[in-house]
Amino acid sequence: MQPDLQSEGLEGFDVVVVGGGPAGATAAHDLARLGRSVLLLDRGGRIKPCGGAVPPVLLKEFDIPESLLAARVNCARMVSPQSREVDMPINGFVGMVDREHFDEWLRERAAQAGAVRRSGHFKSIEHDADGRTWVVYESGSHHSRDGAEPHRVAARLIIGADGARSEVARQSIPEAHDIPFVAAYHEIVSSPPQGVQGFDRKRCDVYYQGELSQDFYAWIFPHGEQTSIGVGTANKGFSMRAAVSKLRERTGMADSETIRREGAPIPLRTLKRWDNGKDVVLAGDAAGCVAPASGEGIYYAMVSGRLAAEAADEFCRSGNPRALRSARKRFMKAHGRVFWILGLLQRFWYRNDNRRERFVSICRDPDVQMLTWEAYMHKRLVKAKPLAHVRIFFKDMAHLLGLARVR
């Protein structure tokens, strides 16, 4: 707590992190380990709809124990509009986590490192005549806000990690009002027995079918004893619940026990600016750190949270708000090209069922599979195999011109 605040009987922190998902919890953990006073403010009682896939590199980079994995999958199955199936075996495994337990573990780790955990709903950022920044919030979870008492804490800096429709971002970053979203909805159900109607606990199924999603995809992702069945779309008139029901019926899981239902927006692009040049920097979905085409967000959220923490620490040390720009700059240097390529892929191949049919057919190609998994598992573009890139280019052109046979 800052000395002047102590003398006035007020509460203050170096950094207030708003949002306790992977981005916010990672930022709070890293800052606490750096010796900063941190308040981690989380709404509580909310679980984001998420397939839950994490690459092995995440476990290494963020020191995550494998015991947190609910399952390991070794194959992805792509299903085309005409129900053609293409299996993409994984050399190794992709981990699956249950966000209910994974996020809480991250928050608790931040607390053990020294961050103060508090359940509350962010309301506003205020500035007083003395130049101090205040975070105003209501205590309690998002289920219990009626009559909640407002609280104020001072902060040198706020990290907004409060999701795709971040209130921190909306109050601080003008562009945040215009970011496009895909809506995601899933149902967590009890996993059926292995092999029943083709169900495989070690395989993720991705459906590129217009009847399930006209502009994104639907999925079945196993989490051990539970399975996520979901869909994403930017079409506001599309019934995601009906699509999930249809997919459950088709795959023999209509009668599986429904454990919970969740929905939330997913940003379609990164914001062009993550900081307000003064006392706010964003991370995670609030900054748009979700990979286009795949919707993958956990790894990128944690990376952005770490970069935001490092920028915040430098800001607290130097007092120079220009330090906040480094979070986005470093993120885009590492991942911007991948995001750009995936964005092009989504805009072209997801446009209609004819193109989705060809997209799934391309996924049968060994070169495509090799480069896809190399990029996913290691979070970098593969530069050492130029001939594979050349072959894929000509195969893509053949599909674009309608010269390739769809298999």
Image (spheres, rainbow, N blue to C red):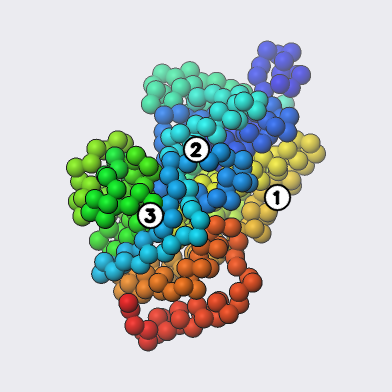
Between 251 and 180, the one lying in front of the other is: 251
Q: Give the label on residue 186, or none.
A: none
**Which residue in the structure is indicated by mark 2?**
68
Q: On the image, numbered disc 3 is attached to which residue?
A: 204
Question: In the picture shown, does residue 224 fall above or below 142?
Answer: below
Which one is earlier in the sequence, the residue at label 3 or at label 2? 2
Q: Is residue 150 above or below residue 110?
A: above
Q: Is residue 1 visible?
A: yes
Residue labelled with disc 1: 326
Judge the density around disc 2: few (<14), some (14-19), many (≥20) Cα neighbours within 10 Å: some
Query: At x 70% / y 42%, what residue is drawn?
Result: 310
Residues packed near mark 1 inside 10 Å, few (<14), some (14 to 19) or many (20 plus): some
Hey, which residue is sitting farthest right in the picture?
Answer: 318
Dot 1 or dot 2, earlier in sequence: 2
Query: Which of the two discs, 3 and 1, labels the residue nearer the N terminus?
Result: 3
Mark 2 and mark 1 in contact (Cβ < 8 Å)?
Answer: no
Q: Is residue 160 visible?
A: no
Number of marks present in the image shown: 3
Residue 158 on image: x %, y %: 63, 35
Element under disc 1: helix
The location of residue 104, given as percent across then percent down, is 50, 31
Marks 1 and 2 sit apart, C-alpha to C-alpha, by 31 Å
- Nearer the observer: mark 3 or 1; the answer is 3
Secondary element under disc 2, as helix, strand or loop, is helix
Give how far across and how far down residue 133 sits, in percent: 66, 30
